[in-house]
Amino acid sequence: MKAIRVYPFSLLTMARPVKRIVLKFGTGILTTPEASTLDRGQIDRLSAEVAAAVCGGYECLLVSSGAVGAGLMALGYEERPKDLAGIQACAAVGQSRLMNLYETAFASRGLLVAQLLLTYRDLDSRKSYSNAGNTLNRLLDEKKVVPIINENDSVAVEELRFGDNDRLSAEVAMLAKADLLILLTSAEGLLNNGELVREVTDIDSVMQYAKPTKGKLSVGGMGSKLLAVKKAVLAGIPTVIASGRAPHVITSILKGEAVGTRFHVKEA
């Protein structure tokens, strides 16, 4: 039995119109290929695409990694610390630097940014979960604000140890009742023996395609992304994994072009 069902991309459509989008930017696409510094040009380019989507009527929320990488660069570390306190110190230093780059990039396009730092304790608490959802909805109602979300790395530990915000992006997509989740990473999508898988309708059938490779500063890899995809599609949210280095990647995805791997929600 074949592991996946592949269709011509143009024949598959979303079950519902897409308006609210959660985009996850991984560490690997926010730093230079040598992982020696934040890639300012890359952050500006991705921000420009998000700004264009917002101006086009989409509601966009960013889940952004990169704070730990920004901090260790600022502190002069050559590699990610092994101890938890060291990693959290890097996150505390790097978060403001990362947000400053986003603020500058979006301000030049007439948009504001809002920072939300979450922990899984927030998401597990009914009251905190409701408050976070209300805050996101109010920010999006403003039409000119892009919420930027990260795990509160200076006090939380889960995504620091595994995930690079992959799971958090799925949780945020569910919290925000998003219509689409986009995971942008260093890979062009899900690969099977070097071949890009374009369409997936059964997430369980492709879990074995994940390879244990990850970037110098990343802590996730394709395995954590597929777990995040599974959480999202089971909640009814279609998901795309694509390369954050590809030009016009967000625009192409929203146009329905054959970019990356698209994971579809199972029909009831």
Image (cartoon, rainbow, N blue to C red):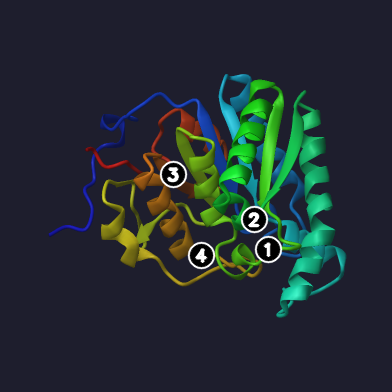
Q: Mark 1 touching mark 4, by CB under 8 A?
A: no
Between marks 1 and 3 in the image, the one whose residue lies nearer the viewer? 1
Q: What x and y, as percent, mark residue 93?
A: 84, 60
Number of the label disc, if any, that sits on residue 119: 2
Between marks 1 and 4 in the image, the one whose residue lies nearer the viewer? 1
* Marks 1 and 4, the one that precedes in the sequence: 1
Secondary structure beneath dot 1 equals loop
Q: Amino acid at mark 2?
A: Thr
Number of the label disc, if any, that sits on residue 240: 3
The residue beneath circle 1 is: 156
Q: Amino acid at mark 1?
A: Ala
Query: In 3D space, how far apart are the residues under numbered discs 1 and 4 (Cα atoms)?
Result: 20 Å
**Label 2 packing within 10 angstroms: few (<14), some (14-19), many (20+):** some
Query: In 3D space, how far apart are the residues under numbered discs 2 and 1 (Cα atoms)?
Result: 6 Å
Q: Mark 2 touching mark 4, by CB under 8 A?
A: no
Q: What x and y, as percent, mark residue 198?
A: 34, 46
Secondary structure beneath dot 3 equals strand
Between marks 3 and 2 in the image, the one whose residue lies nearer the viewer? 2
* Marks 1 and 3, the one that precedes in the sequence: 1
Q: Mark 2 touching mark 1, by CB under 8 A?
A: yes
Secondary structure beneath dot 2 equals loop
